[in-house]
């Protein structure tokens, strides 16, 4: 019985030995702080709501042709105003 090839490249290429590589490639991943061009710098938040509230919000999105994020931002602006904090628009100007 023949011995199995060491790798798929060897099996497909028909080489008996893989080429020796003395150098390793170093891959630099972009840091989380570095922004991609055209991408906004906004933090993600998670909100837990009862299933009935989630369903109602999704229906409102369809009825009023808006996305869920716009409703959540509107509510957050109301809370910030209630407690005398700057609006989301003021935060994004900085």
Image (cartoon, grey):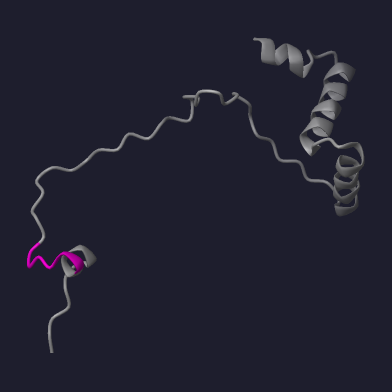
Q: Where 55 falls versus 40 (above or below)?
A: below
Q: Where 39 falls versus 84 (above or below)?
A: below
Quadrant occupied by the C terminus: top right
Q: How many labels does the image show?
A: 0
Span highlighted in magenta in the image: 12-17
In the visual, does 35 lie left or right of 84?
left
In the visual, does 25 lie left or right of 51?
left
Residue 10 on the magenta span: no
Would you identify the image quadrant in which residue 13 lies? bottom left
Residue 15 on the magenta span: yes
In the visual, does 33 lie left or right of 45?
left
x and y, in percent, of residue 52 in the image: 90, 52
Point 83% across, 35% down: residue: 66
Q: Where 75 falls versus 8 (above or below)?
A: above
x and y, in percent, of residue 47 in the image: 76, 41
Instruction: Decide which of 24, 81 is in the foreground and name it.
Output: 24
Point 20% across, 67% down: residue: 12
Chief secondary structure of the magenta portion: loop
x and y, in percent, of residue 82 in the image: 89, 19
x and y, in percent, of residue 83 in the image: 86, 18
Point 8% across, 53% down: residue: 20
Would you identify the image quadrant in which residue 93 lies? top right
């Amino acid at each position: 019985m023949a011995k199995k090839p060491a790798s798929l490249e060897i099996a497909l290429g028909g080489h008996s030995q893989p080429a020796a590589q003395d150098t390793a490639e170093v891959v630099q991943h972009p840091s989380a702080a570095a922004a991609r061009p055209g991408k906004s710098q906004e933090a993600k938040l998670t909100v837990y709501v009862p299933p009935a509230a989630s369903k109602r919000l999704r229906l409102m999105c369809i009825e009023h042709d808006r996305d869920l994020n716009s409703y959540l931002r509107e509510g957050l602006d109301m809370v910030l105003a209630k407690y005398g904090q700057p609006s989301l628009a003021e935060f994004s100007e900085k």
